[in-house]
Image (cartoon, rainbow, N blue to C red):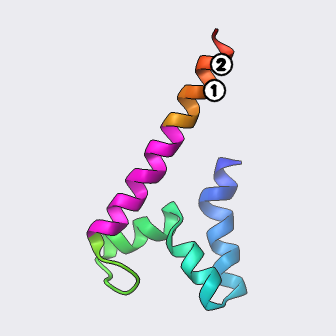
Amino acid sequence: MLFLLLYGVPTVLVGLGGETLRAVGDHLPHGAGTHAMLGDDAPYPRVVGFLIVAGWAAAGHLVGREVLRRRDA
């Protein structure tokens, strides 16, 4: 599931085209990381790209921690 979110969804969004789908893809970890590493200022500055990736990482960490807490009662 994680592989599909990180690699499959951005590829499909780019393939389908459209401004709305491109904007959604820019806020997924793959798109945000690409913009941050390349230093593109097109959709948002480099720092915002790093913050988006950090937000996705924090969200994944919190979800994983909650799942582990419930299962390891």
Residue under label 2: 70
Determine crowd level at label 1: few under 14, some 14-19, many 20+ residues with C-alpha closer than 10 A.
few
Give the secondary structure at mark 1: helix
Position of 42 relative to 29 (above/below): below
Which stretch is magenta?
A: 47-61
Please state if 5 lies on the left or on the right of 37 as rendered.
right
Determine crowd level at label 2: few under 14, some 14-19, many 20+ residues with C-alpha closer than 10 A.
few
Q: Position of residue 5 (x, y in %)?
A: 65, 57
Residue at 34% from the left image edge and 59% from the top image edge: 51
Q: CA distance from mark 1 to mark 2?
A: 5 Å
- The answer to whether the residues at label 1 and label 2 have Cβ atoms under 8 Å apart is yes
When asked about the image quadrant of residue 22, the answer is bottom right
Give the secondary structure at mark 2: helix
Residue at 51% from the left image edge and 35% from the top image edge: 62
The quarter of the picture where the C terminus appears is: top right
Please state if 39 lies on the left or on the right of 31 as rendered.
left
Return the mark for residue 29: none
Numbered label tally? 2
When asked about the image quadrant of residue 71, the answer is top right
Position of 27 relative to 41 (above/below): above
Position of 35 relative to 43 (above/below): above
Q: Position of residue 49 (x, y in %)?
A: 36, 67
Q: Position of residue 60 (x, y in %)?
A: 53, 42
Q: Is residue 59 magenta?
A: yes
Amino acid type, residue under disc 2 in the picture: Arg
Amino acid type, residue under disc 1 in the picture: Val
Please state if 38 lies on the left or on the right of 43 as rendered.
left
Residue under label 1: 67
